[in-house]
Amino acid sequence: MPTSPAPAFAPLAGVRVLSLALNLPGPAALLRCRAMGASCVKFEPPTGDPMGHYNKAAYAALHEGVDVRTADLKTEAGQEELHRTLEETDVLLTSFRPSALDKLGLGWAALHARHPALSQVAIVGAPGARAEEPGHDLTYLAESGLVTGTELPPTLYADMGGAVLASEAVLKALLHTRAAPGTGAYLEVALNAAADWLALPRTWGLTRPTGAVGGAHAGYRVYPCADGRVAVAALEPHFAARLCEAAGVASRDMLAPGTREALAAWLRTRTRAELEAMAGERDVPLLTLAD
């Protein structure tokens, strides 16, 4: 995701965001804010952000264009520096548990009393009373039914989804402030809610094994081919008809096991190059993959 130069349309141009959030969701949200034109500052503890230790490349990508400063918020000097900066900040981004924020004097009541024009976007694991519960991306995905078997999910969906919702919350805070100048807003973003949002297609049955995009439709599956795999996305009837025609499959019932078996048998005999050529000629959506 490019962050520099700023896009021509920058809805957060002139908005100042200060982040205290570590690891992935907060920095990813800050990355999106920066891409939308915000001026971004981040305070890190003297030990740094854990991601800066375990994945330097990811840390560098997430913090491109961000003014990163070191401040120990448990000290008087760190608190003074924080509040000086908050005087010039529009939105504060946090990812602490509520009890930790209270210990730092950054609970919303105290924060709002001291900086009434400041908005806060608080990233938590779960909403409301559950915000004190420990958790991580994996537990939130499991709670939402997005962990099947014992394989780990291929990416950190809850963290990245939460980052999107957090950057959306920054935009909401900006709209609130424009409607009520001088008055900040508090917005909570829960990572398990982000996972629930991403899980809605599965909740509706779309991506379950009996769903059209969960494997039941013969034109929407990953099949072995002669020298790899092919992701076929011939979901619409006209795409499915073209695929079946190319494969010499008479049936157009894409939910019938026989159709799936016939397509699988044909695809297994074709190379990636042959399938890509067929897709180009017949306008069939597919992508070949190496094993």
Image (tube, rainbow, N blue to C red):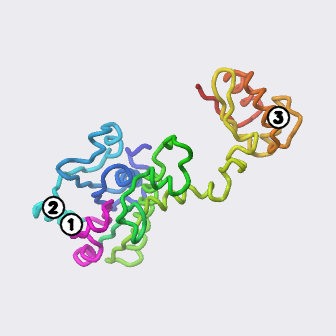
Q: Is residue 15 left or right of residue 262?
A: left
Question: Residue flagged by tag 2: what amino acid is it?
Answer: Lys
Q: Quadrant of residue 82?
A: bottom left
Which residue corresponds to mark 1? Answer: 104
Please, is residue 22 above or below residue 117 in the view?
A: above
Please name whichever residue, 178 or 251, is drawn nearer the observer in this view of the structure: 251
Quadrant showing the C terminus: top right
Q: Which residues are magenta?
A: 89-116
Rendered view: 183 above or below 209: below
Q: Which residue position holds label 3?
A: 244
Query: How far is the residue under mark 2 from the one under mark 3?
Result: 66 Å
Residue identified by numbered label 2:
74
At label 2, counting other C-alpha atoms closer than 10 Å, the crowd grade (few under 14, some 14-19, many 20 or more) is few
Dot 2 or dot 1, earlier in sequence: 2
Within the magenta stretch, is there residue 271? no
Residue 270 or 241: which is nearer the viewer? Answer: 270
Q: Position of residue 157 (x, y in %)?
A: 48, 49
Asked if labels 1 and 2 touch by Cβ distance under 8 angstroms, the answer is: yes
The reply, left or right, for residue 245 in relation to residue 80 is right
Could you tell me the amino acid type at mark 1?
Answer: Leu
